[in-house]
Image (spheres, rainbow, N blue to C red):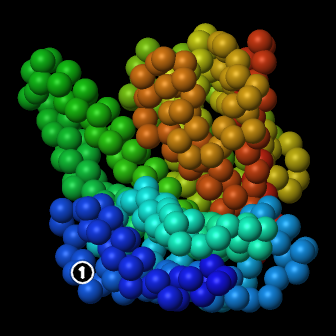
Amino acid sequence: MTLSDFIDSHLEALIDDWTAYARALSPAESQLTDEQLRNSARNLLTGIAADMRELQTARQAVEKSHGDRPSPNSAVNYVGRQHADDRLAHGFDVNDVVAEFRALRASVLRRWQAECLIDAASFHEMIRFNEAVDQMVAESVRRHSQRSERIRDLFAGVLAHDLRSPVGAILNSIQAVQLDKKLSSTSLRAITIALASAIRAKRLVDDLFIFARARLGSALPVELTQQDMGRICEGALEEVRASHPDASIRLQLKGELSGVWDGARIGQLFVNLLTNAVQHGSADVILHADGSVTDKVTVAVWNGGDPIPEQALPTIFNPLTRVSLEREQGSKPSGLGLGLFICRCIAEAHAGTITVESNTDGTVFKVQVPRFPADRAD
């Protein structure tokens, strides 16, 4: 008797074995009934048996062992995705999903070993069985992870969007109170601290909003208008000084700095780079804008201090990289770890580039953006 035939002939007993385990594994808030659990087991087992009956060449066997994914529309992948969707809806995490397949594998092989003669042909059957289970596990985990990540990203996007209005209202109110000439020195100091905190909160919310949009596949929107890069740099510098009054930042401007950009987005890019330089560098920070080239403008932010570890450079613009690096070094993360990722998003939205060089002489982030809309990539 082949293993696929064994599954068919012992289907109800195998379903019983697996249902008892799945019930114990179910989250307390799960509303899965015994009938639903049994139907899940039936779908998994019959899907695996069907996959084992399909003809498979030696090359296909090698490819499967290397993890090459068969057609997304294959029966085994379809069942795996359906199982992941169902379990996610009932509160199962990805470890629970993997544990279910582990129990399914053990139930089948234990009964197979106890009731059938194990010979050379049986080993081939077990290989095919394990291949089918592994493929279904891989597809379920892939689907579960994709859906889970999308749910988290949607939550982050909604949260950031809803926070923008109250944070903006707080910032505007603080700025209005700051204009009151009757404030005592103590009140003025408190208002100044509150303003710096509100600006930082707004920056974090804006970064989170952009991060969520990028993760959900939405292009970062930009509103292109005539701008002066020198003025954008000055505005970014003043904003950072408001939050870091003791920071030493020098501005250097060179050449023709007019162009067509989204001033708010470009300003946010420079604020992120300057804040990063102030927090992680030492000595003076230099913000240098160069418009000597006809078709583009280059802006660089330099700071002294310890160089960025070489192994961190290839992923420095990925989200959460700085947070991971700080945790490895034993220091407290200073933000969400999205600042440099946001910088890359803004540069790319302007068809530009951002690069970094870091050594014992200092660290420099360089941004290049085309001067006019015609230079933007579609």
Rendered residue at 66%/20% (across/down): 303
Rendered residue at 56%/46% (across/down): 319
Give the quarter of the image for residue 12.
bottom left
Give the quarter of the image for residue 189.
top left
Say few, some or many: other residues with alpha carbon within 10 Å of mark 1 (under 14 / 14 to 19 / 20 or more).
Answer: few
* Residue placed most toward the observer, 162 or 113: 113
* Residue placed most toward the observer, 219 or 243: 219
Is 155 left, or right, of 239 in this rendering? left
Where is 54 relative to 314, above or below?
below
Residue 318 locus on image (x, y percent) = 62, 46
Give the quarter of the image for residue 374.
bottom right
Name the secondary structure under disc 1: helix
Where is 166 relative to 117, above or below?
above
Residue 297 locus on image (x, y percent) = 78, 48
According to the picture, the residue beneath numbered tag 1 turns out to be 34
Rendered residue at 12%/24% (across/down): 187
Residue 322 locus on image (x, y percent) = 56, 33
The kind of residue on which mark 1 rests is: Asp
* Residue placed most toward the observer, 172 or 132: 132
